[in-house]
Amino acid sequence: MSQKTEKLTKRRAASVPQGPFNVTPLFAARAEGSVITDVDGREFIDFAGGIGVINTGHRHPKVVAAIKDQAERYIHTCFHVVMYEPYLELAERLCSLTPGNFSKMTLFANSGAEAVENAVKAARYHTRRPAVIALEHAFHGRTLLGMSLTGKVMPYKSGFGPFAPEIYRMPAPYCYRCSFGLEYPSCGLACAEHLHELFRTHVAAESTAALIAEPILGEGGFITPPPEYFPALARICKENGIVLIADEVQSGMGRTGTMFATQHWGVEPDLITSAKSLAAGMPLSAVIGRQEILNAAHVGGLGGTYGGNPICLRAALAVLDVFEEENLLDRARSLGRTLRARLDSMAERRSLVGEVRGLGPMLALELVRDKKTKEPAAEETKELIRYAYQNGLVILSCGGYGNVIRLLMPLNIAEEQLNRGLEILDKGLGQVGK
């Protein structure tokens, strides 16, 4: 550790609580495209993307230009006090981009957790029902309601109770570790059909306002459902008047090769939450969905001082322009094919890799000590992350057992950087798995 980094580390320890976890000991000085440069001038290929926030790359010129232009005009008036056109423009564009052939509206907030909270508020108000169903292994934020919905105790819930009431949980579609001990496709989609059992034993359907689920569970380990899973959930929700909320905070904005992951299965959620890569690093989130749901609450019932900040809105509009003008979804699909081939090869050659899963370029490796017993390799995962940044690559873990490596590099990453990063990952798997 250099003197500069060591000095900053001591300042961090003295002035910042230990609660905010740090994946690496690095301090950034600059970031461009898919590369982060630290305060000591070392370059790191970024396969973390600020936890799925930099789909268009660090400091995309069009995003930077939009931020600068808006900052020269006005920074904040509060939409509740003096309105502005970028709020309307982005709302309109998101309504047209999200799946669903029905009238929609869009509400803006600051973070993914706030989007989730507002989606639940809207669903409860619309249905006049209290209960919300969430999945095991889910992550929906760190606010009281967000962590109550989250299905992982450490580090998100431990010591922070009591939690919000009227939240019920059902098994996730974790085929690699099936809660029912079954195998797809002979399982009869037991994880989705279990919803009927939940209605019998835990909460009545007529008391349930919403079911919230990530199309691909992010922090939960990139758990990827069978293609019939979300259509089954949508059918059951529709039959029972339950609002289906798709939490696309991490899986949206092109991360899976479609603008929103639910589009892979032809599902039209009632509400969709978006954040992370929506504004390329600026704090912005959105709830997009059925007009009759989002427009039900009384005037003043939804909103917030900073929600829909104009600089963040302009950044998001630039992100959508980048997707259109640079055919970023096509690039995402191509990246996904390349990644899948390379990761499948690693799975064949490296004993640590138990499964490769995901959609498009939203892919992950579940690491195990034994491919038959599937014993989670949590310590080895930590070692691999350490090996990676020591060799110039930033990667992240996730999963209920802390043994999943998730890949969240920019969708427009240069081929040279992609190949170099994958080489480091492959060599690390070989080193750690000895």
Image (cartoon, helix red, strand yellow):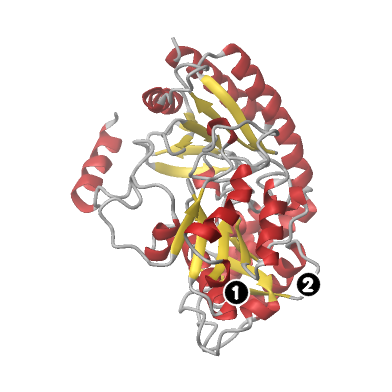
Instruction: Where is residue 373? Give x, y as percent.
Output: 47, 19
> What number of labels is visible?
2
Question: What residue is rendered at 33% in x and 53% in y?
Answer: 157
- Is 296 on the left or on the right of 338, as rendered? left
Residue 226 percent coordinates (x, y): 68, 40
Query: Residue 140: in sight, yes or no?
Result: no
Q: Looking at the rendering, which quadrant does residue 38 occupy?
A: top left
Q: Is residue 380 above or below residue 218?
A: above
Q: Residue at x 60, y 68 (%)?
A: 287
- In the image, taking residue 7 as reference, residue 94 lies left or right, namely right
Q: Amino acid at mark 2?
A: Phe
Q: Position of residue 227 (x, y in %)?
A: 72, 43
Instruction: Tell which of 282 and 18 is nearer to you.
Output: 18
Q: Which mark is residue 107?
A: 1
Asked whether, in this view, residue 421 is left or right of residue 22, the answer is right
- What's the mark number on residue 102? 2
Q: Which mark is residue 331?
A: none
Q: Amino acid at mark 1?
A: Leu
Residue drawn at x 44%, y 54% is 150
* Residue 101 horizontal/vertical position (percent): 81, 68
Per the image, label 2 sits on a secondary structure element best described as loop
Question: For the residues marked 2 and 1, what is the alpha-carbon distance in whole angstroms?
Answer: 16 Å
Assign a secondary structure to mark 1: strand
| Label 1 crowd (10 A; few <14 / some 14-19 / many >=20) | many
Q: Nearer the viewer, residue 265 or 342?
A: 265
Residue 199 appearing in the image: yes
Q: Does 239 sit above or below residue 178?
A: below
- The residue under the point 32% across, 49% down is 20
Observer-side mark, 2 or 1, equals 2
The furthest residue to the front: 200
Of 251 and 123, the residue lying toward us = 123
User: With respect to residue 273, does 220 lie above or below?
Assistant: above
